[in-house]
Amino acid sequence: MTNPLHALKNQIAVVGVGNTAYGSFPDVSDYGLGAQAFRSAIEDCGLDKNQIDGLVCCRVPYYARMGEILGLDPRWTLQMPPHGRMSGISIVEAALALQTGAANYVALIYANIGRSRRVNYGGEDSAAFWDPWGFTSPGAAHAMMFRMHMERYGTTTRQLAEVSVAFRRHAMLQPDAVMKSPMTIDDHEASRPIVEPLRLFDYCLINDGAVCLILTTAERARDLRKPPVLISGFGARDAFRRSAIPNFDPDFWYAETRDAGAQAYAMAGVGPSDIDALMCYDNFSPTVLFSLEGLGFCEQGEAGAFVEGGTLQLGGKLPTNTDGGHLSNSYMQGWALNVEAVRQLRGECGDRQVPDCEIVQYVATAPCTRSIIYTRG
Amino acid sequence: MLGHYDKPLPSDDPDARPFWQRAREHRLAVQRCDACGDRHFPPGPICPACLSDRQSWEDVSGRATLLSWVLFHRAYWVSFRDDVPYDACLVQLEEGPILISNFAGGIPDGVRAGMPLKVVFDDVAPELTLPRFAPA
C-alpha cells in the first residue's frame, strides 16, 4: 500500500531563512522582530515580497497586524499557538498548502519577546489542575520524566550533562548565540538546582528574537537566489489521551517519536544511520535523550550511555543542535533549529559546519511529535 | 495569619467539584464511567473511552505506587517562597489513574520508584484538603 504523503517527497523546498539577533530587546515589539526576520529571509531568497501569498504566524500576537506591517494580502493564513511543538506542525502544514496550490510562497514568522517582558513558564501564568500541590512548569514535568528514566534505566545526571555540554560547545562557534562561555560536565553538576533532578543548565534559555522561513515548491525554488533545501520526509503523531499532566508522558513519548520518525524515514527513504546532523528540540536536556531513543539512534533506555564521550558534538557520531539549540543558542521554539538545518545543508555554517552534510533531521518530541528530514536540493 | 491560606486553590472546574468535596470528607475518589467502567482522572465532562456522559464518583482504596518525584528549589508562586525546597510526587493508584501529589512528611528515606504508598489527608485550610501520600 502506498502512502499518499510519499508523493510529497522532495516536492517542497525551503528557499529563504532569516533571524534577528538574540537577546533582550525591551524597545522592540514582537512585530518589529518578526519584520526584521521576514526582511532577512526575503533578502536571503531574493523573492519580491509581494509574491508571498501564504502566511503563518507563531507567537506573533495577531496575524493581521503582522500582514499589515509587511504589506501582505495572502490567500492562505494560519495563526499558531505559542508552543514549541507548533514549529514542526507549521512547516508540515505549509508544505501541504503549497502542494495543493493553496499558496505558492509561504512565509512562516515566529517572534518571541518573553525575555524582556519577563514571561514565567509556571505559576500564575499557566494555571493547571495540579497547582494546589505546588506542581507547575514544563521544567518540573521534564524533571519528573527524567527521574523516571533514572529509576528505570539507571541514567545519570552526568550523562545528561553531555547534552548541555555539547550544545554549549556548538554555541561558542555560533556568532548569534546567547551563551558563549565554556561549560564542562562538572559545571553542569554544580549549576543551581531548579526542580531536581534538573539544574539550571538543563533548562532552555528565555530570550527575545525572531525567525522567518520561506517555503515554495521545488519547481519554483529553482529560480531563486540560494540552492533549495528539500523537505524529503516528515512524520507526525500526537498524544492527547495522557495530557492530564501538561508536558508530561510516562513513557517519554517513545511510541510517538518512534512512529513520527518511522514515517519520516520511510517517506525520505533513509534511516537513522544516514543522518548527518540532528536538530533536536531541547526545551530541557532530557528531551534529547527521549528523542534519540524514539528515533532509534539507540535502544530505549540507552540514551545516557549513547551520548557519553561527545557523541552529540561536532566531530562526534551524531552532531546535534550545531547552533547551540535552545539550551545555549536561542529559545526560538524549534524555528531556529529548522533554520540551522537549512544552513548546514547549504554549507553556510563556517566553524560549525558538518562536513559533507547532505541529510539533516529535525525532531520535536512533545505531545505533538513531529520530525522533518531535509536534504540538499 | 489565622485562617489565611494564600497558596493556589483548585480552579472552579464544575467537573472537579465532587473530587474536592470528597477530599474534604477524607475520601479519595476518581470518576468511573457507568457505561463502560473506565476510571479516569482528572475528571472530565464525558468518558474519554466511550463518550458517555453517565459518570459516577467512586472512592478508591488510597493505595498507590510511587512512579516519580521531584524537588522544587524555585517558588513559582510567592506563597511557596518559605517552602522551598518542597517535593512533588507522581503516583499510580491501585485502581489505575495517575496523579500528582506531595509526600506527606517529606521525601521518604530510601525513596525509590515502585515503593508502596498510602493516601493521607492534609486539611491545609478550612475549605481545602489535599490528598498526600506516605510510605505504606
Image (cartoon, coloured by chain):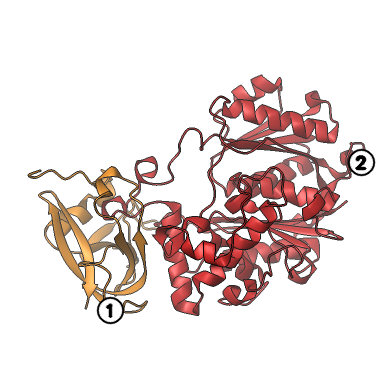
Chain colours: A red, B orange
Left/right placement of residue B88 relative to residue B17 reads right
Q: Residues within 10 Å of mark 2 (few under 14, many from 20)?
A: some
Residue A356, percent across and down? 87, 60
Q: State the mark number for residue A312.
A: none
The image shows residue A25 at horizontal and vertical percentages of: 57, 30
* Quarter residue A322 falls in: bottom right
Residue B36 or residue A307, whichever sits in front: A307
- Drawn side of residue A129 relative to residue B17, left or right: right
Question: Alpha-carbon distance for marks 2 and 1?
Answer: 63 Å
- Please, which chain is the residue tagged with disc 2 on? A
On the image, which quarter does residue A305 sit in?
bottom right
Q: Which residue is mark 2?
A: A222
Q: Amino acid at mark 1?
A: Pro
Residue at numbered disc 1: B116
Question: How many residues crowd around disc 1 within 10 Å: few (fewer than 14), some, or many (20 or more)?
Answer: some
In percent of width and height, residue A145 lies at 45, 65
Residue visible at 77% across and 66% down? A315
Q: Do the dots labelled 2 and 1 sit on one chain?
A: no
Give the residue type at disc 2. Arg
The quarter of the displayed image where residue A211 is located:
top right
Q: In the orientation shown, which residue stands out farthest toward the right?
A: A223
Relative vertical location of residue B76 with respect to residue A35 in this rendering, above or below: below
Tag 2 secondary structure: loop
Residue A23 placement (x, y as % from top left): 59, 38
